[in-house]
Amino acid sequence: MYRDIVDFALTTPAWLHTLAEVGTDAGLFLFAALFVLTWWRARNAPPRDLALAIAGPAGIVCAYVSSEIVKILIREERPCRDGVATIAACPPVGDWSFPSNHSVIAVGAAATLVLIWRTLAWVVLPLAAVMAFSRVFVGVHYPHDVAAGALIGLVLAPLFTLLLVGAVTPVVRLLRARLSVAQRA
C-alpha cells in the first residue's frame, strides 16, 4: 500500500507536493491557534472549562513524549531509506518511523480540541486525517506508522488532558480568587 500511495503521489501536480509537505506543519500551527482561541473563549467560563483549555496542549505534549518513547524502543527505519523516490526528503538516520509523531500531534490536537469545544469537530477531525495521510503521501511514513500515531494521539492526548485538568482546575480557581481580591483592593 505504501508504494501505491507514493507512486500515485509522484504523478500529482507539483503544487500538491508543496501543499502536502508544507500543509502538515502549517496544520500544526493552525491547531496551536485554535488552542489560543479555546483559551480566549474559556477565559471567563467555569474554572474546569478554562483548565481544559490550559491542560489540552500539555496533554498533547505528554502523548508526543509517549510516542517518542515508543519510537526509541522500536527503531523502525523510514520507508524512504529503501531507495524509493518520494516527494519529501528522507529524514536523517536515527529519526525513526514508528509511530508518526505528526499523526500523534495532529490527531491528539483534534481529539483534545473536540473534548474542549465539540463544534470544532467538523474542522479539526478532517484536518487531522489529511495531515496524517500526508506523511505517507510525501513518503516519510508507512501507513501503519500513521495509524499507530493516530491511535496514540486519539487515546493519550485527551486522557492526559483529563488527568491534568484535575490539578489545573484548583489553580484556576485560586488565581481567579486572587485576581478578584487584587481588583477590589
Image (cartoon, rainbow, N blue to C red):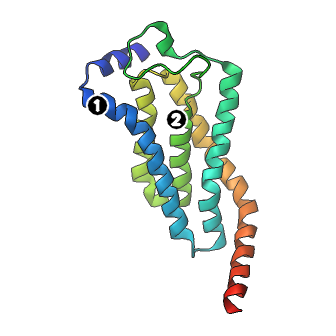
Q: Mark number for residue 103?
A: 2
**Alpha carbon separation for disc pair 1 and 2:** 19 Å
Residue 28 x/y as whole percent: 48, 44
Residue 46 x/y as whole percent: 62, 74
Residue 163 x/y as whole percent: 72, 53
Q: Secondary structure at mark 1?
A: helix
Residue at the extreme bottom: 185
- Which callout, 1 or 2, points at the residue further toward the start of the chain? 1
Q: Mark number for residue 129?
A: none
Residue drawn where x is 53% and y is 23% of the image? 144
Q: Nearer the viewer, mark 1 or mark 2?
A: 1
Q: Amino acid at mark 1?
A: Leu
In the rendered image, is residue 124 in sight? Answer: yes
Look at the image and tell me in which quarter the N terminus lies: top left
Residue 165 x/y as whole percent: 69, 59
What residue would you read off at disc 1?
16
| Residue 159 shown left or right of residue 140 in the figure | right
| Residue 26 shown left or right of residue 100 in the figure | left
Q: Amino acid at mark 2?
A: Ser
Q: Secondary structure at mark 2?
A: helix
Look at the image and tell me in which quarter the C terminus lies: bottom right
